[in-house]
Amino acid sequence: MSKLKNKYLVFLGVLGLFIFSITAHAQSKTDLEKKKARLLKEIRLTNKLLKETKKNKELSVGELLILNSKINARNRLIRTMNSEIQLIGNDISSYESNIVLAENEIVRLKSEYAKIIYYAYKHRNTYDKIMFIFASEDVNQAYKRLKYIQQYTEYRKSQAQAIVTTQNDLIQQIAQLKEVQQENSALISLQVQEKEQLSVEKSEQENVVKHLQGQEEDLKKKLKKSEAAKRKLQKAIQRIIEAEIRKAREAARKSGNNSKGFPMTPEAKKLSASFAANKGKLPWPVSTGTITARFGKHPHPVLKGIVINNNGIDISTTKGSKTRAIFSGVVSAVAIFPGEGKVVMIRHGEYISVYSYMSDVFVSKGDKISTKQELGVLVNEAGKNKATMHIEIWKGMTKLNPEYWIYRK
């Protein structure tokens, strides 16, 4: 009897592990579904921006960058779907294995229960049970035999309940298996549609590139003008940061601190540490947008042999969008730069964030800023219902990749 009970307990243990595994999978599946929803939202935004761009009836590098961003998001969406399909596939395998286990357990339980019923039938006479007890050699043995009869009766009831419970579990798991199989089929179908759409977008990308390659000289002129404006902005930013560092060091020397880095007050150190601790979790500098130009050196999307160096990232968003602070801090500078619009710089202890391409700003130098506080309105691109912002993050004189600091989609 104890062996039967142990077998049933082992089965329940295996079932418990299976349920724990499914719960863990559910958590991962929830994360994948959230990521999928964010990517679909980004794709809808790029579709809206492309629609507005095409109203101009003139293909541009800006349109190509948005299209590239949409293709990138679509690729990530397909990879996310693939991960979800694999996860569901694992769940299906687990359900199938557990169904086999439950079916075998039901067969075993029924077999053992049949033996119990047969034994009970043979000893169904109450007189036999009384005689079994009275035939004991002493009171202690009589007590043990009485307890045995009671335990056997309880065990028979528990075996019957075990069969019912296992059958119910089996029915539930079969239903859940059918559900995840249907979900898997639907997801595979959606992934096929996404791959077909990706193929269409890549063909469109090739056509845009070919068209723009026919405007090579005009593109080079625009690029030269744009790069000149960016260099002026970078030199200005560096001068402001250098001036702040010099000022901080002079103040520190007067107080007897000859630090070579960026001297900070205890309050600034705390702010700097908090900023660093939030790497990868900082909010986006716009409420909605898609990255269209990434950090570092990259080949020009159209002009062969030309490399573009970006000290931050560019984010395309909708017309009239506002820029917001990625973290609390103090405004270091507000300036106007030809070709770049108005620029706001915010210090977060040792770190500084730079926001460009604004037509109007709401803050002034020295203002204390809170996370997500609106800083200004972005410049609307001529003839288009969209805007682009540029953000940089510095640590001292070192440029950092903002994409690693803001929340990753």
Image (spheres, rainbow, N blue to C red):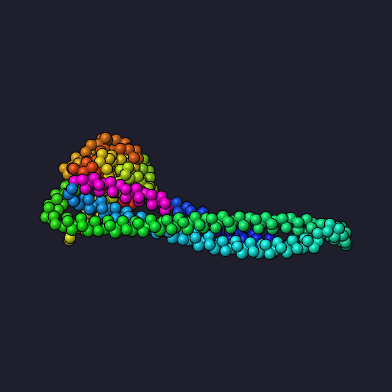
Residue 33 part of the magenta segment: yes
Q: Position of residue 396 (x, y in %)?
A: 28, 48
**Along the line of sight, which residue is nearer the eye, 15 or 357?**
15
Q: Is residue 344 left or right of residue 170?
A: left
Say if 248 sits above or below 292 in the image: above
**Along the line of sight, which residue is nearer the eye, 95 or 342?**
95
Say if 94 sits above or below 268 in the image: below
Q: Main secondary structure of the magenta part?
A: helix
Q: Position of residue 209 (x, y in %)?
A: 20, 57
Residue 375 part of the magenta segment: no
Quarter the N terminus occupies: bottom right
Q: Is residue 163 left or right of residue 19?
A: right
Q: Position of residue 350 (x, y in %)?
A: 31, 46
Q: Quadrant of residue 3?
A: bottom right
* Residue shown at the point (24%, 52%) measured from the top left: 65
Q: Position of residue 249 (x, y in %)?
A: 27, 44
* Residue shown at the point (73%, 64%) measured from the top left: 115
* Residue shown at the point (34%, 48%) measured from the top left: 41
**Can the viewer see residue 77?**
yes
* Residue shown at the point (79%, 58%) measured from the top left: 149
**Along the line of sight, which residue is nearer the eye, 213 or 344?**
213
- The magenta-colored residue range is 31-56
